[in-house]
Image (cartoon, rainbow, N blue to C red):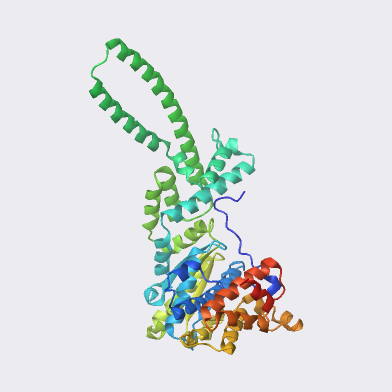
Amino acid sequence: MEKFFEKKEYISKPSYPQYFLQHNPFYVSQALLEKQDAGDTRSLFLRHVYQKEINRIMAFIGDLASQPGMPRLWILKDDSASPEHSIAVIGGIFRTLLRSESPRFYATYAPLPMLAENPLREVTHLLVDRFQDPIFRRCLYSFIYQELEKVLESNQANEVLPEVDVEDILARMNETRGEVIEEILFPKKEEEEESGVESQESEVESQESGEEEESEVESQESEDTGLKVKETEEEKKQKEIARRLADFIVEVSKKMQFGAQVESAIEVTVRESFSKGLSNLSQYLKYRELIPGLIQLLFYVYKRVVVLVDQLEMWGMFEEAQKGRFIGTLSELEWLAKDKAILIFSSYAETLEEVGETYTAGFIKQTLDLKLANIDVATPLSDEQLTEVLSEFMASDPYRTQKKDNLKRKKLDDLYPFTEDGVKQIIEHEYSDIVNVLDLSGRLLDEGRQAGYPIIDREFVRQMFT
């Protein structure tokens, strides 16, 4: 059974290997399409173009996440397209990073002007600002679960945590996605609330019913006293379990060397409350100490921490001292994050040259290809134009790029698995509506894979409309 915190590994295995495709290149989220006016062909077309590039870059980042060390990626914006197109794609990449579950990323967006004064400090602020209650809980639940699991697997649970049913706690944590740990650590809070409600109800009932017979009162008091004794014993037992568990978590956290700030936040959390622990963490002073510990805690849930530095076009406005500090402190960030982060820069090629080869040589470069955004879809497109658009989408798939030699050896062209007569049939059915052509092409790829068709020809396209 998959545990609640498990990081799903990014699988680079292609979804459409028979078509030499990693993913369906025509896929656009239905939620995105629904936000657009159904009659706004250009907006819908641009969504396809943007998503094509987002999918391509995200597949690349997914591969980087599986590599050792701290990969550095420089995304070069497309000089041939209007700036808003590159902005839309960079924004889409960041949103996708935030939503990604395979691999799971902890991403933060850091525009260069914000980092001008002290890059390392501001990046730390951005990382902590995102570290809100749900994320804090998810990471701490995962840390506690994994450490309890180690104790259970070592067959030392009775020695390390006497009177604590570790196996039961693990099962309940898995069932509740970790949330039960708060109930275990703070058992009295819930009982006090219930006791307060019962006390108020009892007082109201007493006022309404009047005085009872003395003998009945004495009898009832005797029964209540016996019940309170039992509740007190159970309460003591739960408090002892909570104390032992809290001590264990605090002790283990110190061995993990999270650093004083994260260790303090964990201790406050397990002894007082999650809200106080998170507040304690936010009141940091030494960010060089905080970054390694915070990233280590995040790593219990996330595959990589991603820092996306955008708007590097402002580089020329920096003074030389600022430039040196920027490069130096980001190099320090790499050292502090070790092999748990990915650093992504985004700019035009001109900025890359301004920054200089000395620093940029270690970056892997990926250039956005947004020339399709320049197509005027307000006028009917020719068959040749529509075919070229389909070819561009197919060629954007990273797996197809890797297997280009295989395609050539098998004498397959850029449109494969679409045949010329298949494309003509698509165009004949959808005329010059580029959005419908792309949507239909995506559905045909899905249908072809499921049906086991090696090619998507005229006959197969016709079957879609019969």
> In this view of the protein, which residue sits in the foreground, 242 or 84?
84
Q: Measured from the top left, where is residue 308 in percent x and y? A: 47, 72
At 31% from the left and 12% from the top, the residue drawn is: 216
Q: Is residue 217 above or below residue 202?
A: above
Left or right side of 337 for 83:
left
Left or right side of 423 for 219:
left
> In this view of the protein, which residue sits in the foreground, 445 or 98?
445
Q: Measured from the top left, where is residue 233 in percent x and y? A: 44, 26
Quarter of the image for residue 365 reads: bottom right
At 26% from the left and 27% from the top, the residue drawn is: 204
Q: Measured from the top left, where is residue 220 in percent x and y? A: 34, 16
> In this view of the protein, which residue sits in the foreground, 64 or 402?
402
Q: Is residue 44 above or below residue 215?
A: below
Q: Is residue 202 above or below residue 260?
A: above
Quarter of the image for residue 423 reads: bottom right
- Residue 20 appearing in the image: no
At 59% from the left and 86% from the top, the residue drawn is: 388
Q: Measured from the top left, where is residue 136 in percent x and y? A: 45, 54
At 47% from the left and 30% from the top, the residue drawn is: 237
